[in-house]
Amino acid sequence: MIIAVSGTPGVGKTTVSKILSERLGYEYVSIKDFALAKGIGEKVGDEIEIDVDELSRAVGEEFSGRDVVIDGHLSHLVPADVVVVLRLHPKMVAERLESRGYPRKKLAENVEAELVDVILVEAIEENENVIEVDTTGKTPDEVVDEILSLLNSGVKRRVGIVDWSWAYDDVVQYLMLGGD
Ligand SMILES: Nc1ncnc2c1ncn2[C@@H]1O[C@H](COP(=O)(O)OP(=O)(O)OP(=O)(O)O)[C@@H](O)[C@H]1O
């Protein structure tokens, strides 16, 4: 089975994916490393631009029929049996990205993306089987317990569990409303 773990930068995809793959005995795959190894990523400045169609084709060819956890914020766009979208209170997204030294503009873009469910909406457009998990206030192990409990009980779709609109006032300071 292919399990994709996606979400806004900083929500904990890598941490959770590694624990999840260990507990399931699945292979762990970083989508970014995979893309680069396949020569799909192209460096533009300090960002890597990835052709998603090419990436999807390569993932299908390489992993179909294998048991893998695919980690990365593009993983919801590639063929997977289930997509896990991790969510985190946008203020905590801001704090984690701030502590990583993200530039102001990139931080604002990502806080806004979490606030308005960008990855979740894209995942739902792409895949029937989407499981949304709120990681706020949970340890990585608790998040993995929740994912495994849902998967083991046959749940393939659980969405609409968070609404960050009430948190807008907490994060407005991080947003760049209407300009640079
Ligand atoms: N419940 C949780 N789940 C996952 N990570 C958590 C949790 N609580 C705290 N953390 C911490 O948050 C950080 C998340 O970093 P991580 O690299 O896993 O995020 P990411 O979503 O993969 O980021 P990026 O998209 O930038 O690679 C880690 O330092 C981790 O220890």
Image (cartoon, grey):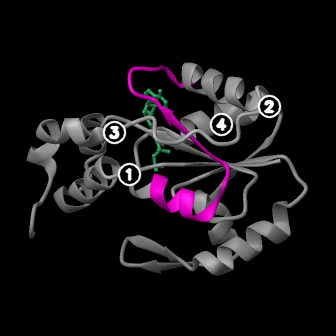
Q: Residue at x 29, y 47 (%)?
A: 115
Tell me the number on the disc at residue 163.
3
Q: For the magenta stretch, what is the residue range? A: 120-140
Using residue 175 as the reference point, say whether residue 45 is left or right of it.
right
Q: Position of residue 77 (x, y in %)?
A: 60, 65
Examine the rendered structure and indicate whether residue 83 appears above or below residue 150: below
Location of residue 41 by image quarter: bottom right
Q: Earlier in the sequence, mark 3 or mark 2?
A: 2
Cβ atoms at labels 2 and 1 below 8 Å apart: no
Location of residue 146 by image quarter: top right
What residue did someone put label 1 on? 117
How far apart in space, not on screen, are marks 2 and 1 (Cα)?
A: 28 Å
Examine the rendered structure and indicate whether residue 161 appears above or below residue 23: below
Quadrant where the C terminus sits is bottom left
Instruction: Give the residue type at disc 1.
Output: Asp
How far apart in space, not on screen, are marks 4 and 2 (Cα)?
A: 10 Å
